[in-house]
């Protein structure tokens, strides 16, 4: 939808999209001339600039920071963490609320908000997490996603 070589990016400071021309290094708020508005809108649905997700993190003994707000020390193996995550995956498929399960079990500080990470853009999260999150449609839940933090279930909410 954009005339070459323009690209669309997200400004975190202004919390809005802007247009950048990598050749001229020019950036601007308004769409460049000859932008096909409808095509750009469609493109942005398929390639969101930021997404909002909930996640449920289960850490294991090889996690980069094997500690969390949860009392018991983290001694389970990655295989055991994946096994436990599949139990939560089944509970979600059986209709239990993602937020409730994240509050109960997640090893991430976002557990307080039902696993809500808020909006994030490309580059904010670890690559494996970002890849999985941006591949989800709104409302969709991922399979098990591994990162240096542990193993995650991700639900895209916006
Ligand atoms: N909104 C952002 N930009 N926040 C920075 C995210 C940093 C990013 N984090 C991750 O990629 C993983 C995936 C999701 C959570 C997460 C890891 C850890 C748990 O793992 P650990 O670091 O103990 O190994 N939780 C966090 O970071 C939390 N502050 C996420 C969060 C919590 C409450 C509100 C917003 C975000 C990274 N580059 O490490």
Image (cartoon, grey):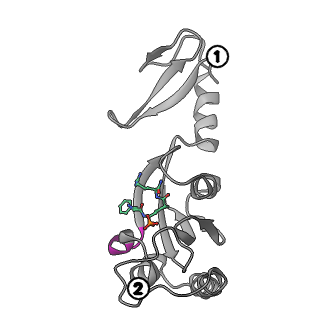
- Quick check: 55 above or below 26? below
Query: Where is residue 6 drawn, in percent x and y?
Result: 59, 18
- Magenta region, main secondary structure: helix
* Residue count near mark 2 (Cα–Cα under 10 Å), binned few <14, some 14–19, many ≥20: some
Q: Which residue is mark 2?
A: 104
User: Of residues 75 and 133, which is closer to you in this image?
Assistant: 75
Which labelled disc corresponds to residue 61? none
Q: Which mark is residue 5?
A: 1
Q: What distance separates the C-alpha of mark 2 from that of mark 1? A: 47 Å
> Magenta residues, as a range?
111-115
Q: Residue at x 62, y 67 (%)?
A: 146
Image point (53%, 43%), residue name: 122
* Local secondary structure at mark 1: loop
In this view, 78 is above or below 51: below
Report if residue 135 lies within the magenta region: no
Q: Earlier in the sequence, mark 2 or mark 1?
A: 1
């Amino acid at each position: 939808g954009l005339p070459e070589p323009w690209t669309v990016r997200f400004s975190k400071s202004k919390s809005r999209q802007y247009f950048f021309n990598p050749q001229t290094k020019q950036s601007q708020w308004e769409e460049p001339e000859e932008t096909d508005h409808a095509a750009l809108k469609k493109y942005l649905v398929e390639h969101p600039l930021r997404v909002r997700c909930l996640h449920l993190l289960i850490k294991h003994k090889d996690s980069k920071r094997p500690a969390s707000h949860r009392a018991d020390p983290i001694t389970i193996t990655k295989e055991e963490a994946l096994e436990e995550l599949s139990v939560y995956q089944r509970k979600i498929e059986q209709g239990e609320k993602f937020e409730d399960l994240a509050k109960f079990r997640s090893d991430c500080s976002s557990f307080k908000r039902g696993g809500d990470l808020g909006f994030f853009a490309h580059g904010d999260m670890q690559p494996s997490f970002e890849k999985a999150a941006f591949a989800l449609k709104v409302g969709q839940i991922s399979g098990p996603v591994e990162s240096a933090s542990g193993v995650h279930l991700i639900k895209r909410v916006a």
